[in-house]
């Protein structure tokens, strides 16, 4: 009985603590669409004013949303992170933007996906990689796509519309519309040619 009461209370508190468009924290975002929600407990959230969230989007608990790497960091572009309408961002995902991450409408991700538009430089052999100047390359995820759990979307990835990224895949470069990609690095294993699904 005690356990059931604790679980019921926890569910109630999580619902009450979730961030909706009319809550104070939502006002810190550049855009926070009607019907959208960030689940509780939320992950790290930095640079909210450079993040736009569309309408009716669900961002699950423990999701990191970041424009920059620390509070108060000034950005070169505005917005930096765009999440479209009717998206579902899975629990434990991290979306870390520095220049531009553009996620279209109706994009769903599994749990623990990592999306970033920045990598450390490594060209200077006498300097630790962690302190070298980073390189930015915009990321685009087309509308209607599905990103499987554990996938990593690297800087410069341009994923087309209605694409499937397999679980634990690592994506860089171009992914054509209506494709299924899997692996490390991700490769196209199926695509739609306008009439039916086929293999390359």
Image (cartoon, rainbow, N blue to C red):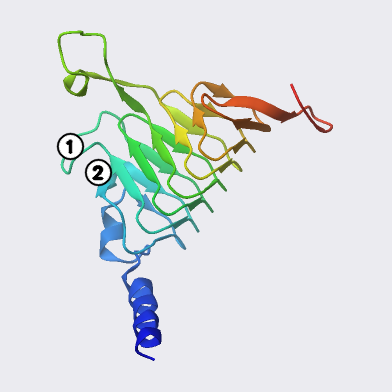
How far across and how far down the image is residue 110, in percent? 51, 49
How far across and how far down the image is residue 149, in percent? 50, 45
Q: Nearer the viewer, residue 89 or 48?
A: 89
117 sits to left or right of 172: left
Tell me the SS state at disc 2.
loop
Quadrant placement of the C terminus: top right
Q: Quadrant of residue 183?
A: top right
Where does label 1 land, which residue?
A: 73
Q: Quadrant of residue 135?
A: top left
Where does label 2 land, which residue?
A: 47
Up/down of 54 relative to 25, above or below? above
Query: CB atoms at circles 2 and 1 under 8 Å apart?
Result: yes
Q: Residue at x 32, y 24 (%)?
A: 119
Residue 79 visible to an observer of this rendering? no
How far across and how far down the image is residue 111, in percent? 46, 50
Q: CA distance from mark 2 to mark 1?
A: 7 Å
Residue 158 visible to an observer of this rendering? yes
């Amino acid at each position: 009985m005690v356990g059931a009461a604790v679980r019921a209370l926890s569910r109630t508190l999580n619902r009450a603590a979730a961030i909706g468009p009319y809550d104070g924290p939502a006002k810190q975002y550049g855009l926070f669409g009607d019907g959208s929600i960030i689940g509780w407990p939320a992950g790290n959230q930095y640079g909210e004013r450079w993040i736009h969230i569309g309408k009716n989007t669900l961002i699950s608990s423990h999701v990191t949303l970041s424009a920059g790497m620390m509070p108060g960091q000034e950005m070169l572009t505005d917005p930096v992170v765009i999440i479209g309408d009717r998206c579902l961002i899975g629990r434990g995902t991290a979306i870390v933007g520095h220049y531009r991450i553009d996620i279209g409408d109706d994009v769903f991700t599994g749990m623990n996906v990592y999306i970033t538009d920045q990598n450390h430089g490594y060209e200077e052999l006498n300097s630790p990689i962690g302190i070298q100047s980073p390189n930015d390359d915009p990321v685009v995820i087309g509308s209607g796509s599905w990103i499987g759990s554990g996938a990593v979307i690297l800087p410069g990835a341009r994923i087309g519309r209605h694409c499937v990224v397999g679980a634990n895949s690592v994506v860089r470069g171009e992914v054509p519309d209506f494709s299924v990609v899997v692996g490390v690095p991700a490769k196209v294993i199926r695509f739609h040619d306008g009439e039916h699904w086929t293999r390359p």
